Image: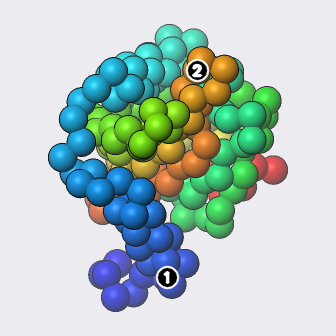
Amino acid sequence: MNRNTRSVPTRWATWTLALVLLALVPGWAQAAEGDVAAQIKAMIIANNDYVRANMKDQEGGVSKHGSVEFWSSGGLIQMTEPGADISEYDEFSLTPKHIEVIELPGGQSAVAMYYSEGGMKRKGAPGVSNYLTRVTQVFVLEDGAWVSRAAHYSAVIGGSGTNQTSVD
């Protein structure tokens, strides 16, 4: 799909995210690697390691206010509620790569951007053998733990996103 054939909501979401980042964090591209960035990078890697070892998502990674998300399946915006059912997998080999984290002013929130690559098969769903997705996640600090408050997953050309299009 070329750039001119993208849907209006996709273009709107991409530009909105870019404008929000630029407005909130002057000079964001030069953000230094700090303790928050190191913590979030380690958490992203540990979460993927946990899923590979246990074949299910880790509990407690979503904000008490939920997480607003665009999934790589191309579906509409979703709200992941805290305490939602934990996904279980028959196969999971996703690996996060090139993780960049930008701490937002105040030290209580941060944005992580990275690639997720590998394969996965949720129980009861078709497998995705060539998952290659760009990830942008907004994390907030709640009760001493970093949790997801918003996320946007978009498949990279030549790769696949998930096949799940809604929470139900």
Quadrant (top left, top right, bottom left, bottom right) of the N terminus: bottom left
Along the line of sight, the residue nearer the viewer: 83 or 125: 83
| Disc 1 target residue | 7
Residue 72, x across and y down, in percent: 50, 55
Extreme left residue here? 30
Outermost residue to the bottom:
4
Q: Is residue 46 above or below residue 69?
A: above
Q: Amino acid at mark 1?
A: Ser
**Left or right: residue 144 compared with residue 28:** right
Residue 105 image offset from top left, x and y in percent? 42, 42
Label 1 – label 2 distance at C-alpha: 36 Å
Crowding around mark 2 (Cα neighbors within 10 Å: few <14, some 14 to 19, many 20+) is: some
Q: Which numbered tag is attached to residue 145? A: 2
Q: Residue furthest front?
A: 106
Q: Is residue 14 visible?
A: no
Residue depicted at 40% across the width and 31% down the height: 94
Q: Quadrant of residue 149?
A: top right
Front in this rendered view, residue 106 or 167 = 106
Is 27 situated left or right of 41 in this image? left
Image side of residue 99 versus residue 151, left or right: left
Q: Give the residue at x 56% y 54%.
A: 71
- The amino acid type, in three-letter code, at marker 2 is Ala
The percent position of residue 76, horizontal first and vertical second, equals 65, 66
Query: At numbered mark 2, what does the secondary structure look like: helix, strand or loop?
Result: strand
How was this image coloured? rainbow
Indicate which disc, 1 or 2, sits on the residue closer to the N terminus: 1
Q: Nearer the viewer, residue 61 or 91?
A: 61
Tell me, yes or no, if residue 75 can be seen here. Answer: yes
How crowded pointer 1 is (Cα within 10 Å; few <14, some 14-19, many 20+) is rated as: few
The tag on residue 164 is none
Dot 1 and dot 2 residues touching (CB under 8 Å) = no
For image coordinates 58% across by 20% down, the residue present is 145
